[in-house]
Image (tube, grey):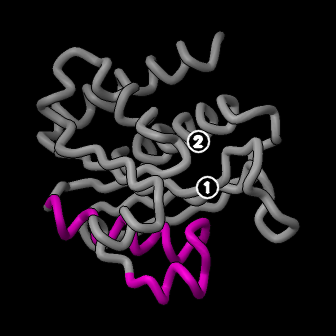
């Protein structure tokens, strides 16, 4: 099955589960550039479950909108577990959503380094007082592959938390 179809199926399951449980989801995405929000909002009825989607692509937007201190970004880099955790926790404070998701990574084709290669992605999910942050290293099979793989993992991660 095509990865896009799989994503739509997962998104449908997620939206249905969120609506059934009367939960709101908000997201702050970086390397996926709004793909997660787009997949969710393509599902009819998603407005009952989707609160806010931010594309905080630049460091400046992470500082201004998500209130992440510049010194923290400078110390760890925008693609790090620390920044991903800041993103999800501050998003949760801003929105008051039941579930918050943050994504930061390097989708390529450039921007990678030895320590932070193309395909490195961090995903954080916060529900109530519990925050889970996972690190992934997707194969460098192109920007779209990395972005779709990231959204797929994000959907599965949230569905797993809702069980």
Marks 2 and 1, how far apart in space? Answer: 9 Å
Q: Position of residue 146 (x, y in %)?
A: 68, 38
Q: Quadrant of the C terminus?
A: top left
Of badges 2 and 1, nearer the viewer stands: 1
- Mark identifier at residue 52: none
Give yes or no for contact between labels 2 and 1 (Cβ–Cβ under 8 Å): yes
Q: Residue at x 29, y 61 (%)?
A: 127
Q: Badge 2 is on which residue?
A: 150
Q: Residue at x 25, y 26 (%)?
A: 16
Helix, strand or loop under label 1:
strand
Give percent across and percent down for residue 61. Answer: 36, 62
Numbered tag placed on residue 105 in the rendering: 1
Judge left or right: residue 142 versus residue 50.
right
Q: Which residues are magenta?
A: 69-95
124 or 52, which is in the foreground?
52
Q: Is residue 123 left or right of residue 131?
A: right
- Structural crowding at the residue carrying mark 2, measured as other residues with C-alpha within 10 Å and reported as few (<14), some (14–19) or many (≥20): many
């Amino acid at each position: 099955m095509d990865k896009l179809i799989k994503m739509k199926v997962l998104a449908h399951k997620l939206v249905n589960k969120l609506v059934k449980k009367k939960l709101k989801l908000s997201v702050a995405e970086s390397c996926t550039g709004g793909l997660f929000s787009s997949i969710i909002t393509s599902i009819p009825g998603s407005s009952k479950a989707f609160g806010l989607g931010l594309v905080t692509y630049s460091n400046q937007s992470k500082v201004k909108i998500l209130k992440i201190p510049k010194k923290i970004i400078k110390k760890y880099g925008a693609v790090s577990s620390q920044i991903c955790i800041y993103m999800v926790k501050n998003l949760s404070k801003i929105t008051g959503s039941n579930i918050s998701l943050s994504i930061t990574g390097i989708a390529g084709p450039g921007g990678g380094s030895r320590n932070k290669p193309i395909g490195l992605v961090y995903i954080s999910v916060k529900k109530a007082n519990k925050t889970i942050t996972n690190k992934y290293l997707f194969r460098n099979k192109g920007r779209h592959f990395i972005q779709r793989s990231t959204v797929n993992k994000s959907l599965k991660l949230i569905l797993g938390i809702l069980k």
